[in-house]
């Protein structure tokens, strides 16, 4: 079967090269579109939740805390900003927690 294939044909060689390349490009485009759609849905859910909490007269601190817990943020937005403003860097606090007791 392989002996009958004309390996010198430029169309055949180009097809062998282009199929995997085009497949990779298609997969990359699908991954980008899916990721952007997921981010849009998350932003929509977050905006809806914020509006519902505002309508129910939640405090801003409570909204930040709930959003941080719901959407997986490590620090509420204000807390992270305050830590950086007061000179405590996130890297130094992280490295201190990683040290073993002596």
Image: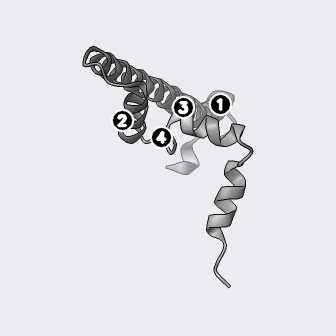
Q: Determine whether label 1 and label 4 are within 8 Å by CB.
A: no
Residue at which label 1 appears? 14
* Residue 16 sits above or below residue 2 on the image: above
Q: Secondary structure at mark 3?
A: helix
Tell me which label, 3 or 2, sits earlier in the chain.
Answer: 3
* Residue 44 sits above or below residue 88 on the image: above
Q: Residue at the location (63% across, 37% down)? A: 82
Tell me which label, 1 or 4, sits earlier in the chain.
Answer: 1
Residue at which label 4 appears? 73
Badge 3 local density, few (<14 within 10 Å), some, or many (20+)?
Answer: few
Tell me which label, 1 or 3, sits earlier in the chain.
Answer: 1
Residue 61 in picture, x, y percent from top left: 43, 31
Residue at which label 2 appears? 66
- On residue 69, the disc is none
- Tag in front: 3 or 4: 4
Whole-Å distance between the Cαs marked 3 and 2? Answer: 34 Å
Residue 6 visible (yes or no): no
Residue 83 visible (yes or no): yes
Whole-Å distance between the Cαs marked 1 and 4? Answer: 48 Å
Q: Is residue 56 left or right of residue 44?
A: left
Badge 1 local density, few (<14 within 10 Å), some, or many (20+)?
Answer: few
Q: Determine whether label 2 and label 1 are within 8 Å by CB.
A: no
């Amino acid at each position: 079967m392989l002996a009958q294939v004309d390996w010198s044909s430029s169309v055949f060689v180009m097809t062998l090269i282009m199929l995997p390349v085009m497949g990779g490009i298609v997969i990359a485009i699908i991954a980008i579109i899916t990721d952007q759609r997921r981010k849009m849905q998350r932003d929509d859910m977050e905006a809806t939740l914020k509006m519902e909490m505002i309508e129910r007269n939640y405090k801003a601190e409570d909204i930040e805390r709930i959003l941080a817990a719901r959407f997986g943020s490590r620090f509420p937005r204000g807390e992270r900003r305050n830590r950086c403003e007061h000179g405590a860097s996130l890297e130094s606090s992280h490295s201190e927690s990683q040290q073993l007791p002596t």
